[in-house]
Amino acid sequence: MTDRCSPLPARFDALVKVIFTDVDDTLTWEGRLPAATFSAMERLRDAGIRVIPVTGASAGWCDCMVRTWPVDTVIGENGSFWMQHDGTGHVIRHFREMENDRERNVRYLRTLGVGLQRRFPDIGLAQDQPFRLTDVAFDIAQQAQVDRSVAEEATQWLIGQGVSARLSSIHINAWIGSYDKADTAKVWLSRNLPHLDLTECAFIGDSPNDEAMFEHFPVSVGVSNIRRFLSGMQYQPRYISRSNGGYGFVELAESVL
């Protein structure tokens, strides 16, 4: 599939009021959050533009983000929940599935994870697995280095077992539930900003794990490091930044501001 992305414009014609963003290799780069990226998030917040991470990261990471970053909401574990400040200093969790269903699903996913590791011995659990509430994540490029073809085969094996699975730049995430990043982002919008149109939102991401967001959000951006995945992606971002990771996010912030 060819690269259909246009360069990120210097400014957008429509007013962007909310930026949904992936985290790993979109806000971060080479495992770190650049100071310029954090500063860009603060500048956006001060301008009244909400930045909402939409990530496959664990509940543990999401709790840290929503409490310490200049954001008031984080959508985590590929849309399983969002964590949001309630205006009194407390963080409230909103799950997409009922507690009994979540517990049953996690038990099955753990069993499935054992089967995957037997079939693909080079693939182990992500180090943040103990801090996950609803999914299972396998490390393919964080602590480990798994050949991309093996990671793709493992992802397809999981899908063949009847669960949702997505391949990101560092993990394979597997979950059970009728949701994904885009579905939960739209549910969050309907409950919190019901009069906001999708054209007033932007999304920025870096990998096939973000395809649902690229499909549903008309103002979509890929950071430059997404280029290595574009040939295998059905839904591509509309625009692409010049810079990688968090430095590409800074470019988007400049265009919006």
Image (cartoon, rainbow, N blue to C red):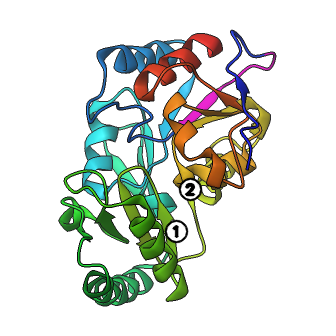
Per the image, label 1 sits on a secondary structure element best described as: loop
In the rendered structure, find residue 208 and report the number of the disc placed on it: none
Closer mark to the observer between disc 2 and disc 1: 2
Q: Nearer the viewer, residue 65 or 208?
A: 208
Count of numbered tags: 2
Image-quadrant location for residue 71: top left
Per the image, label 2 sits on a secondary structure element best described as: helix
Asked if residue 252 shows in the view, the reply is: yes
Q: Nearer the viewer, residue 214 or 15?
A: 214
Helix, strand or loop for the magenta stretch, by majority? loop
Q: Which residue is mark 2?
A: 181
Q: Is residue 69 magenta?
A: no
Where the C terminus falls, by quadrant?
top right
Q: Is residue 44 above or below residue 211?
A: above
**Residue shown at the point (27%, 32%) measured from the top left:** 68
**Residue shown at the point (54%, 86%) measured from the top left:** 160
Q: Which residues are magenta?
A: 13-20
**Crowdedness near tag 1: few (<14), some (14–19) or many (≥20) residues, C-alpha within 10 Å:** some
Asked if residue 205 shows in the view, the reply is: no
In the shown orientation, is residue 102 left or right of residue 156? left
For marks 2 and 1, give the CA distance. Answer: 11 Å
- Which amino acid type is shown beneath numbered disc 1? Arg
In the shown orientation, is residue 181 left or right of residue 157? right
- Of the numbered discs 2 and 1, the one sitting upstream in the chain is 1
Q: Residue 113 location in percent, x, y?
A: 30, 82
- Which amino acid type is shown beneath numbered disc 2? Lys
Q: Which residue is mark 1?
A: 96
Q: Residue 49 location in percent, x, y?
A: 57, 22
